[in-house]
Image (cartoon, helix red, strand yellow):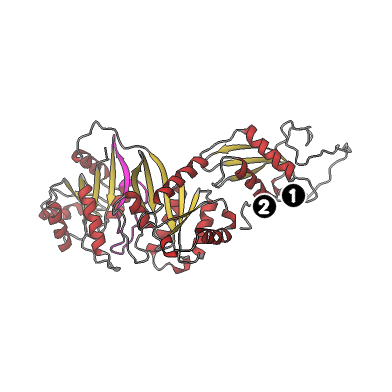
């Protein structure tokens, strides 16, 4: 059973996206005074008491898109209307009725679906009497609300719930198995990939760069499992952002990376890797997200062997040599299912946990094969390791001084963990902590210590002399990829 759908419709600039975010309880859709900002259907799930509802934001009816995407936007609006169980027709309480409102009202009356007339921007009760003119639309009594001033939400919830279809005995949809964020530069085929996964025209696809503006969650099912694919706006250089809309789009793309289980970084096969691609890769790395390099439009590179481009990607991203590379042609659906299967495998790796005994056996072998070098005239020691979290796998190394272990040796330890542990293709978060010693305990007497060298030297007895005062030096753990 699918969830009942509540679709928000209306002419441009009446506050549909503000109302959507207000009902959702968080900022999802981009809100901007520019008409026609919303193009695709933006959806989220909200709860009305004991009912789950899918809420959909649509583009403005009657808008003339600057990129000649009016027909595609209208098609997305119609898809939302056809899916809806209840329609929220939003009007502007301060501006009154416009000719576009009359056009939308005629379209609403033809749907034969429950319609709630919502007079938005009624920030104060003194504006409520002005809303009586909306009776002319023939859709009943307008409900005065204000998304900006948080006014009228309980009343709106009550009316929506009353108009929803009866609860079915069928179970609710399956829980989400995986959230996959699709990110990349503009015009790399991200929306085409989403439509292929959803098996329908879920996103507007156009040759115009920057067609997608919002981060859109698209739910679909494969092999009895439910997934969410997060389509994001194409990212540009910060200095090239032409408007506030592109600025918001970029930040929503970054937020999508943070909340995803796996990130697919799309690369355009015919185009060289750019600075934007490198910045996105670094952001993914800093957030320790499992990722896949997805090289799209591979049909345009025939007959180049995949190994040639794979070598180019590896040389460009040396710190991400563990990230798998997939070659697809989203336009015809080639290898799309294989990428989804790979994303599930990576999520399984990132969710794995390793026992402390197995982890320390691998660490002991690594230390014996290649002990850490001397630093600051001291011998670094790693006593033991433990995994403290998953998604991402987080391993803590207890040492005699985090500042004594450099980045090069940390990369060696990470590479060993990937080779020997069930995390071969995902990012591992490695943390260093100073082992707290009990008063009177010798540094090399800890029973859980893993020797940093293969031979131990006898410790010389210390003279009982008063320690000399030394200047306090601020130390901190090394940045894992500081020299990326």
Q: Nearer the viewer, residue 117 or 1?
A: 1
Q: Nearer the viewer, residue 66 or 159?
A: 66
Q: Secondary structure at mark 2?
A: helix
Residue 251, quarter of the rendered image: bottom left
User: Residue under circle 2?
Assistant: 407
Which range is magenta? 23-51
Residue 22 in the image, given as x and y percentages of width and height: 32, 49
| Vertical placement of residue 300 versus 47, above or below | below
Which residue is found at the position 32% from the left and 60% from the top? 205
User: Can residue 418 be seen here?
Assistant: yes
Residue 149 in the image, given as x and y percentages of width and height: 31, 51
Between tags 1 and 2, which lies in front? Answer: 2
Q: Check the picture and name the quadrant holding the N terminus.
A: top left
Which residue is found at the position 44% from the left and 47% from the top? 259
What secondary structure do most residues of the magenta stretch adopt? loop
Which residue is found at the position 12% from the left and 52% from the top? 110
Residue 465 in the image, given as x and y percentages of width and height: 88, 40
User: Residue under circle 1?
Assistant: 472
Residue 420, quarter of the rendered image: top right
Q: Nearer the viewer, residue 8 or 346?
A: 346
Distance CA(mark 1)–CA(mark 2) = 23 Å
Query: Neighbour class for label 1 at 10 Å: few (<14), some, many (≥20)?
Result: few
Q: Is residue 118 left or right of residue 397?
A: left
Q: Is residue 46 magenta?
A: yes
Q: Nearer the viewer, residue 297 or 105?
A: 297
Query: Neighbour class for label 2 at 10 Å: few (<14), some, many (≥20)?
Result: some
Q: Secondary structure at mark 1?
A: loop
Q: Is residue 164 magenta?
A: no
């Amino acid at each position: 059973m699918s969830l009942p759908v509540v679709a928000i419709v209306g002419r441009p600039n009446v506050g549909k996206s503000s109302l959507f975010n207000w009902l959702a309880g968080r900022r999802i859709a981009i809100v901007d005074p520019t008409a026609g900002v919303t193009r695709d259907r933006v959806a989220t799930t909200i709860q009305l008491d004991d009912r789950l509802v899918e809420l959909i934001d649509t583009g403005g009816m009657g808008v003339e898109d600057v990129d000649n995407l009016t027909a595609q936007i209208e098609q997305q609006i119609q898809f939302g209307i056809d899916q809806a169980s209840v329609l929220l027709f939003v009007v502007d309480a301060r501006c009154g009725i416009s000719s576009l409102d009359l056009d939308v009202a005629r379209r609403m009356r033809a749907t034969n679906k429950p319609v709630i007339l919502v007079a938005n921007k009624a920030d104060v009760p003194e504006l409520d009497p002005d809303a009586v003119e909306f009776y002319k639309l023939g859709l009943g009594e307008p409900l005065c609300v204000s998304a900006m001033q948080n006014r009228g939400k309980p009343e709106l919830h009550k009316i929506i719930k009353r108009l929803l279809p009866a609860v079915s005995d069928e179970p609710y949809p399956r829980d989400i198995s995986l959230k996959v964020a699709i990110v990349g530069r503009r015009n790399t085929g991200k929306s085409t990939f989403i439509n292929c996964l959803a098996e329908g025209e879920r996103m507007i696809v156009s040759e115009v760069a920057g067609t997608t503006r919002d981060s859109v969650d698209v739910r679909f099912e494969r092999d009895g499992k439910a997934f969410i694919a997060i389509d994001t706006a194409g990212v540009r250089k910060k200095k090239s952002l032409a408007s506030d809309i592109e600025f918001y789009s970029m930040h929503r793309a970054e937020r999508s990376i943070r909340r995803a289980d796996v990130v697919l970084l799309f690369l355009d096969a015919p185009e060289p890797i750019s600075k934007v691609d490198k910045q996105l890769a670094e952001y993914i790395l800093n957030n320790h997200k499992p990722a896949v390099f997805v090289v799209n439009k591979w049909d345009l590179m025939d007959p180049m062997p995949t190994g040639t481009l794979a070598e180019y990607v590896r040389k460009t991203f040396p710190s991400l040599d563990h990230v798998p590379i997939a070659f697809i042609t989203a336009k015809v659906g080639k290898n799309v299912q294989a990428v989804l299967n790979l994303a599930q495998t990576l999520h399984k790796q990132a969710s794995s946990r390793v026992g402390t005994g197995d982890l320390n056996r691998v660490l002991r072998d690594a230390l014996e094969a290649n002990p850490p070098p001397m630093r600051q005239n001291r011998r670094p020691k790693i006593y033991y390791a433990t995994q403290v979290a998953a998604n991402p796998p987080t391993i803590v190394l207890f040492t005699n001084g985090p500042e004594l272990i450099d980045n090069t040796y940390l990369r060696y330890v990470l590479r060993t963990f990937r080779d020997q542990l069930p995390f071969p293709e995902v990012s591992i978060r490695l943390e260093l902590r100073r082992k707290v010693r009990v008063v009177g305990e010798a540094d090399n007497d800890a029973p859980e210590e893993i020797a940093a060298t293969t031979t131990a030297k006898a410790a010389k007895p210390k003279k009982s002399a008063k320690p000399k005062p030394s200047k306090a030096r601020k130390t901190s753990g090394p940045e894992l990829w500081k020299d990326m």
